[in-house]
Amino acid sequence: MTITPTTVFVIALLTAAATGLGALPFLFFRRMTRTWLALSNSIAAGLMIAASFGVIYEGLSAGLLQVVSGALLGVLFIALSTRRLKGSGALTFGTLRGVDALKGLMIIGVMTVHSITEGVGVGVSFGGGQALGVFITTAIAVHNIPEGLAISLVLVPRGEPVWRAAAWSVFSSLPQPLLAVPAFLFVEASQPFLPVGLGFAGGAMIWMVFAELIPEALEDTSSAAVATAVTASLMAMVGFQWFLRG
């Protein structure tokens, strides 16, 4: 099969659609208590920590300085963005208001930034041949499902409908098809961006976990419950990433 820009776009679009599958478990869970919200934050935190170190590890092979610089830029960006959003008055995001709206905007923003690097990765991988492109794209598509789950774990317990959480999950991955094509067409120009972009996404995710998700979780349940949920979800995600790489 001849790989064309249209082929790359369609395949990358399917990887974005896979993110919406992460919302499916919430079709079977309707009652959301404060304890469940805390555990949801904890599980999302574990998934995001594992994902952040996964993308940082990928970037290290291309350059330590670029990854570290990108991570610091990611931390600075999300810290300043959060401060600005908190000072902008009453926030509204879908059915969410105030602090809940801030959390929703933050996780979608962070995951969208993460998807930018994945989109470039898809395009670059197809530039290396069809077999490599199909393998990398399949891995990203499967990896997108727990990322959609992380988004839904923040949105649904706060009152967003499942269908809207799925839609926002897919939205967060739209940079993948949009950037895969130019990255495929300009492989050499795209490659230097990857380590900085991967570090940026990783730094932003780590900041959000420790500045927002875990502190809020500790308000509504015990530190032992939070630690258990974070560790379990982190190890599950690490095992999942190992399986994909194997």
Image: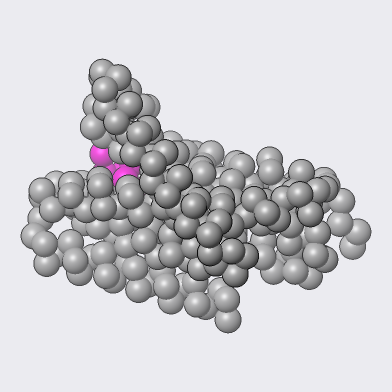
Q: For the C terminus, which image quadrant?
A: bottom right
Percent x, y for residue 179?
69, 43
Percent x, y for residue 41?
26, 52
**What residue do we see at 51% from left, 68% from top?**
57
What number of labels is visible?
A: 0
Query: What secondary structure is the stretch in magenta mostly built from?
Result: helix
Residue lying at the far front of the rendered structure: 65
Q: Is residue 27 visible?
A: no
Q: Is 165 situated above or below 21?
A: above
Quarter assignment of residue 182: top right
Q: Is residue 109 left or right of residue 61?
A: left
Q: For the N terminus, which image quadrant?
A: bottom right
Magenta span? 152-158
**What residue do we see at 37% from left, 27% from top?**
94
For the residue pair 48 and 83, the one nearer the viewer reads as 83
Percent x, y for residue 112?
51, 43
Q: Is residue 196 visible?
A: yes
Q: Is 43 situated above or below 90?
A: below
Percent x, y for residue 111?
47, 46
For the residue pair 128 and 174, the one nearer the viewer reads as 128
Q: Is residue 168 left or right of residue 216?
A: right
**What residue do we see at 25% from left, 57% from top?**
42
Quarter assignment of residue 125: bottom right
Q: Is residue 157 magenta?
A: yes
Q: Is residue 119 magenta?
A: no
